[in-house]
Image (spheres, rainbow, N blue to C red):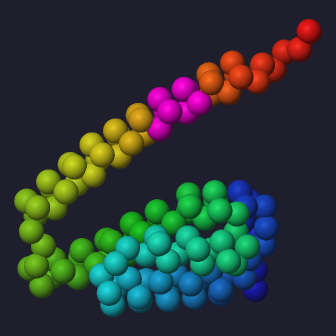
Amino acid sequence: MSIYLPIAELPVNILLIFGLGIAVGFISGMFGVGGGFLMTPMLILVGIPPSVAVASVPSHMAASSLTGTISYWRKQLVDSGLGLVLLSGGMLGTAAGVWVFSLLRRAASSIWSSTFPTSCC
């Protein structure tokens, strides 16, 4: 049984992808690690292009994080203050990373275009 992934432009076995999600979710739950570092290479090994795999993994990470947080919340082990500080820092860090990346991309683009002009004659 396969499903067609339009962005990756290929069909994949839905049971294989579902099994990968279960396995990576189980391992990340057992060891308390993020599943992204496991899921991305697994998707690439299955044949999904790296850019699609990297862009698709955050949804798996969000689901895994949410269920873990709910489980810990029920046990009253979540420190809301610490979580909000980490969330704020993560959002600022992400925004700064995107800003720096866009600056580097513009700089590289201008260096590339001045080194290798596209117009000839």
Q: Percent position (x, y) of residue 85? A: 14, 54
Q: Residue at x 50, y 89 (%)?
A: 23
Q: Percent position (x, y) of residue 18? A: 58, 83
Q: Residue at x 72, y 82 (%)?
A: 13
Question: Is residue 107 one of those drawn in magenta?
Answer: yes
Question: Is residue 98 one of those drawn in magenta?
Answer: no
| Quadrant in which residue 8 is drawn | bottom right
User: Looking at the image, which is closer to me, 65 or 86?
Assistant: 86
Q: Percent position (x, y) of residue 49? A: 70, 63
Tell me, yes or no, if residue 113 can be seen here.
yes
Q: How many marks?
A: 0
Q: Residue at x 35, y 46 (%)?
A: 94
| Residue at the front extreme, as displayed | 115
Give the vertical position of 68 relative to 107 (above or below): below
Q: Percent position (x, y) of residue 73? A: 16, 77
From which residue to which does the magenta span run?
101-108
Q: Residue at x 84, y 15 (%)?
A: 119
Quadrant that contains the N terminus? bottom right
User: Looking at the image, which is closer to me, 62 or 97?
Assistant: 97
Magenta part mainly helix, strand or loop? Answer: helix
9 left or right, relative to 88: right
| Residue at the top extreme, as displayed | 121
| Quadrant in which residue 45 is drawn | bottom right
Quadrant that contains the C terminus? top right
